[in-house]
Image (cartoon, helix red, strand yellow):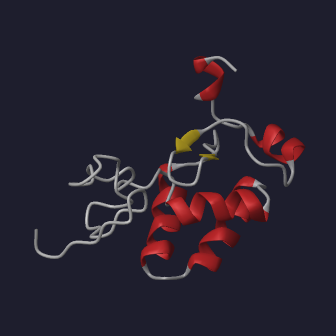
Amino acid sequence: MTEKNQNKKYSKDEVIKFGDNTPDRGIFCPKCETNIPEFEDMTPELETRVLKLIRDGKRLMAMVELQSALACSTHWSKIWVLHSGKPSPDYPGPPCPYCSKPLKTSLAKYCLHCQNYWRNK
């Protein structure tokens, strides 16, 4: 898929056609290796409402709002809500002080690669 197609937003017709299949384009999240779908019909007002529901801990309501407004599947709305529409900002984290491979988050004190654990270093 070309870079141009990778960044193309989904139309309502495409969303309906794809159904529950995993999105094949959108913003790539390196943490979970999933494409976060982008929607042509996502208005700033809708995005603001959904993000507020997410901040208020009402993720299920946020998913229902997306499904209702955009005709997307539960799978797609869950992907979007879990990411708040963008990839995880902490991934990859800074390099491990021992092996230099990326840590899971910027606050990690344990390396998943070399299994080193440190405190206050």
Q: Position of residue 63 (x, y in %)?
A: 66, 69
Q: Tell me: 18 left or right of 39.
A: right
> As rendered, which of 40 and 60 lies closer to the eye?
60
Relative to 19, residue 120 above or below: below
Q: Tell me: 71 left or right of 5.
A: right
Name of the residue lying farthest toward the left: 121
Name of the residue lying farthest toward the bottom: 57
Q: Tell me: 91 left or right of 44.
A: left
Counting the numbered discs, the total is 0
Relative to 111, residue 36 above or below: above
Q: Position of residue 54 (x, y in %)?
A: 49, 73
The image quarter in which residue 109 lies:
bottom left
Relative to 45, residue 101 above or below: above
Q: Position of residue 118 (x, y in %)?
A: 21, 72
Q: Position of residue 57 (x, y in %)?
A: 49, 82
Q: Tell me: 29 left or right of 60.
A: left
Q: Residue at x 42, y 62 (%)?
A: 112
State the quadrant of the C terminus: bottom left
State the quadrant of the N terminus: top right
Q: Residue at x 42, y 75 (%)?
A: 55
Q: Residue at x 64, y 45 (%)?
A: 37
Q: Residue at x 55, y 41 (%)?
A: 28
